[in-house]
Image (cartoon, rainbow, N blue to C red):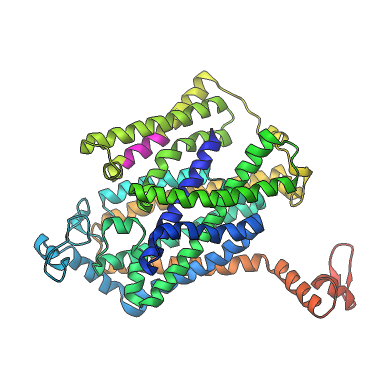
Amino acid sequence: TFLFFAFCANIIVTSMLLLGGAATVEALTGVDYRLASFLIPWGVILYTSAGGLKATFIASYLHTVIIFAVLITMITMVYIKVYSSNQIYAFLEQTVSYSQEECEAIFSDEEGVTFFEKGKYACGPVNGNNGGSYLTMLSGDGLMFGIINIVGNFGTVFVDQSYWQSAIAARPSSAAKGYLLGGICWFAIPFSLATSLGLTSTALMLPISASEAGSGLVPPAVATELMGNAGAALILVMLFMAIVSTGSAESIAVSSLIAYDVYRQYFNPDATGKQILLVSRIVIVAFGLFMGCFSIVLNEIGLNLGWVYLFMGVVIGSAVIPLWNMMTWSKASGKGAVIAAWSGLILAVIGWLSGAQAQSGKISVATLGTNEVMLSGNLIAILSSGLIHYVYSKFIDPQDFDFAELDKNITLVEHDMSGLGAEQQDPVELRRAERWITRRGYILTILLIVVWPLLSIPAGVFTESYFAFWVLVAIAWGFGAAITITLLPLMESSEEILEVLSGMWNYITCRSGNAKEFAKEEGEVEEEDGSVVA
């Protein structure tokens, strides 16, 4: 059951990458999106199939550094070099001040024929927003999107194998701190980019339609407007880094699921490391080719990145609470989790289709993609499955599972214990890491999802000074995340990096070993306690 939801998560996430990537490549370079959909996966296939998870980790760091370099460049261009927060504020206020007739005149061709449609282009008051303004947190559509976003991303975090394998590969203490810090740094990407490029596209009233925005074309359009071809090139680089980094993780996730949970579990329980590696490489190539074809099919149907993003929670949201219960609640029923996940999915799809029929009188791609309809499907998925699993576990099939027994059912390939030291298996250390991440995770969740929006509500429509403070926070968050994500891994791995570099230098200079061994050659002696003295 949960293997199915895991595959769905991988396919949906990769679909979004290819849909957004192909649309952007076509808009900036003129390459047909169908060709781009096939070419983009090969950038992932080549090094992922050769290097595996280690290559993914190393490449992801380099890709992330480049992404944040482009991010802070765009923030600097918008709010420091080209415009200021006060100018963007004035432009946004002017955008919502136009009447229908003025908007039609602005969005018209050379012959004076208008192509303006209300709700399709950014011009005039915003329906559902306080005062019709973009400068407010009191937004009906914003609230709906926020809830959909939370449900969908809960689904990816709980169901996507790429998160699990990265956590398993790290030390418990490092995984806890890394995921929390990584989440804080990641938030700078949507927050800072939306505050800079997103608001600038609206402030300048660029002729970007709602469907084009849904395809992810806002950043390249604004970057090109601000920096010309250089901006387009930077966005292309940023896009490629994001696609290759995430696409590599998704490919490794799918290959791991098939190699370990299908091939090794059902076909070859005694599979060796080489056999599993071969299966993984075959799956990576096959998955990349399949996703190229699948993304073309989705585009032909009329689905874009935004539509698939909203739809994500409808499909995988029902697996969230059953999985959460299975990991944290000793009385959780395994049978109940399966029933709840499938029941939640079925109910979500029924509610989603019914919502479109009730709201618009017909079922189509457009009517199924409205915020209200997507919200109904997402909420039904996550809430109904949670209720069903609780009732089943509490009253029908209560369990008393001993989590200490979990390790006994995990078998290692060729009994490889590399990387599993005493610290990684120490129950006390594991409990300490669990308490550390649980407390801080809940606090950060409440702050970001509840406290921050609530504190923004009394402001109503932002004043010029309030918006300036908002922009300052976005800039500080972006630069702080860029510095952290760039320097912290280097500092934590400084000893290992030094050993590698010194080993390379010793090889070039015809010496043997790494820095430690070279120190011994120079007359230093290693004591029994591991310290080195002259």
| Residue closest to the eye, 89 or 339 | 339
Residue at image point 48% right, 71% down: 69
Question: Quadrant where the C terminus lies?
Answer: bottom right
Whether residue 14 is visible: no
Q: Position of residue 292 (x, y in %)?
A: 48, 52
Magenta stretch encompasses residue 375: yes
In-image side of 274 versus 443 (left or right): right
Residue at image point 40% right, 39% down: 314
Q: Position of residue 300 (x, y in %)?
A: 35, 49
- Choose top left, top right, bottom left or bottom right for residue 263: top right
Q: Position of residue 424 (x, y in %)?
A: 71, 48
Kindly give the residue lying farthest to the top in the view shown. Answer: 396
| Residue closest to the eye, 262 or 312 | 262
Whether residue 426 is visible: yes
Residue at image point 50% right, 38% down: 5
In the rendered image, the vertical position of residue 342 relative to residue 283, given as above or below: above
Q: Position of residue 532 (x, y in %)?
A: 85, 70
In-image side of 527 versus 152 (left or right): right
Magenta stretch encompasses residue 533: no
Q: Which residues are magenta?
A: 374-382
